Amino acid sequence: MKHLTVDEILDFVSLTDLSRESVELAAKVNGHTRRCEQCRKTVCAFQEIYDQFVRYSAEGSFKNFISEHFSGMTPSASGEPDAPEMSR
Ligand SMILES: [Zn+2]
């Protein structure tokens, strides 16, 4: 059995239109993942990452991403007690 390629999975996960190619790809991926757990897991993992990516983009978000992940690293007005991250 021929597995799905990374390109196919990426295209599938990021499908936004309903062109004939998209529908065919979706049918192919769905048909395969029904029988192949390995590819199903890969598709799921890609979907999760893609969802996060889309969520950040939708929130306008480079700014949000930065503030969420790097808050405390930027010099802000003095005196604001940020919880120090000591764990490593
Ligand atoms: Zn497979």
Image (tube, grey):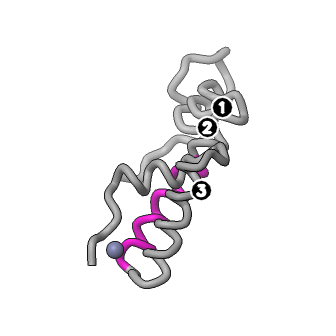
Q: Inspect the image, locate mark 3, and give the three-letter code of the amino acid beneath it.
A: Val
Q: Residue furthest right?
A: 59
Q: Residues within 10 Å of mark 2 (few under 14, many from 20)?
A: few
Instruction: Find disc 3 in the rendering and name its residue.
Output: 23
Q: Inspect the image, locate mark 1, and give the three-letter code of the amino acid beneath it.
A: Asn
39 is higher (above) or lower (below) than 53: below
Residue at mark 2 to residue at mark 3: CA–CA distance: 36 Å
Q: Residue furthest front?
A: 20
Q: Secondary structure at mark 1?
A: helix
| Residue stretch rendered in magenta on the structure | 38-52
What residue is drawn where x is 65% and y is 43%?
A: 17
Instruction: Find disc 2 in the rendering and name its residue.
Output: 68
22 is higher (above) or lower (below) than 33: above
Residue at mark 3 to residue at mark 1: CA–CA distance: 34 Å
Q: Nearer the viewer, residue 7 or 42?
A: 7
Q: Residues within 10 Å of mark 1 (few under 14, many from 20)?
A: some
Instruction: Find disc 1 in the rendering and name its residue.
Output: 64
Q: Inspect the image, locate mark 2, and give the three-letter code of the amino acid beneath it.
A: Glu
Q: Secondary structure at mark 3?
A: helix
The percent position of residue 43, horizontal first and vertical second, equals 46, 64
Foreground mark, 1 or 2?
Answer: 1
Q: Are marks 1 and 2 in contact (CB under 8 Å)?
A: yes
The quadrant of the rendered image in which ligand 1 is seen is bottom left
Residue at mark 1 to residue at mark 2: CA–CA distance: 6 Å
Q: Are marks 3 and 1 in contact (CB under 8 Å)?
A: no
Q: Nearer the viewer, residue 11 or 41?
A: 11
What residue is drawn where x is 43% and y is 57%?
A: 9
Q: Is residue 2 left or right of residue 34?
A: left
Number of numbered discs present? 3
Marked residue nearer the N-terminal end (2 or 3)? 3
Q: Is residue 61 left or right of residue 13?
A: right
Marked residue nearer the N-terminal end (3 or 1)? 3
